[in-house]
Image: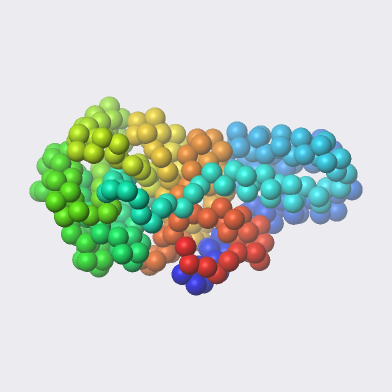
Amino acid sequence: MAGFFSQLKQGLSKTRQNFMDKVSQVLTGREKIDEDLYDELEELLIRSDIGVKTATDLVAGLRREVKERKLTQAEELREVLRELIAGILEKGNPPPLSAAGMQVILTVGVNGVGKTTTIGKLAHWFTRREQRVLLAAGDTFRAAAIDQLEIWGQRSGVEVIKQAEGADPAAVVYDAMQAAKSRQVDVLLIDTAGRLHNKVNLMEELRKIKKVIAREIPEAPHEVLLVLDATTGQNALQQAKLFQEVAGVTGIVLTKLDGTAKGGVVLGIQGETGIPVKWIGIGEGADDLRPFVAADFAAALFDGNEGEEAEV
């Protein structure tokens, strides 16, 4: 959608001030590249919600490039840092518009991150591209989650497969798999409960759901998307590590990037977990969830002057 880069640039303005503007302040006026400069940069990176490991890796990368390129001016580190960050971000890839057979997408995440809303926005995104979509209300722990998913389904003209509150989520998923196959849909989006107070129960529930899915389509689910709230910063990184352990996450959906100074967590997530960020949310509207494009994100993060106003 035209204008999305401008929206992304605006949404990342606080992150840019918290991160790149401070990097520029550290580099400006320095006459040489020395240990004090490396130390200052590492401390700044750690404070910018990037995470200790990713910050350390970035500084190690700077050291390596300075030596290989024989750089002497501190200001030259800005472009090198940009290149290193772009390399981390490029782990994310936009999803295909279509593929052979039905695509089953399982969504996971704690309560309060916008998981159900994200599923609704994904349904909107796929239906706008003439994909036949079906929703499965697998979060039977909260009646509100079922109601909310139905509202999003109505907005996009998408059917929701559901059962009563407290029903077995695996049973809901079974019904949804049968309905999706009979209706020959292109994309089945499955919601799941977000509670984390008992990791054993969560693992068992997800295991049952995955077993049901795989019994109907052996290679499914094709994606396990973890929804994270960017405003929680390092907490989002910890959630990513936990769900990576229990759910076999294949991609991240990072919501609420607009207006937060903690957007640097994108780097921490990809740098420390290896899980690519595949979608980002920068607003409340149905069109404000979009596939993650590394080049646009990097441009908006650094100076906001190089993105493309293109349809994704």
Residue ID at (30%, 36%): 219
Image coloring type: rainbow
Residue ID at (26%, 44%): 192
Residue 285 at what x, y percent from top left? 38, 67
Q: Viewer-proximal residue, 249 or 144?
A: 249
Left or right: 12 as drawn, with respect to 139: right
156 to 119, vertically: above or below: below
Residue ID at (35%, 64%): 129
Residue 304 at what x, y percent from top left? 63, 64
Residue located farthest toward the bottom when viewing the structure as drawn: 2
Residue 35 at what x, y percent from top left? 81, 35
Left or right: 163 as drawn, with respect to 241: left
16 to 216, vertically: above or below: below
Is residue 143 something one can see in this rendering?
Answer: no
Snapshot quadrant of residue 261: bottom right
Left or right: 179 as drawn, with respect to 193: left
Residue 134 at what x, y percent from top left? 22, 55
Q: Viewer-proximal residue, 206 or 214?
A: 214
Is residue 12 something one can see in this rendering?
Answer: yes
Residue ID at (35%, 43%): 223
Q: Viewer-proximal residue, 26 or 79?
A: 79
Snapshot quadrant of residue 51: top right
Snapshot quadrant of residue 72: top right
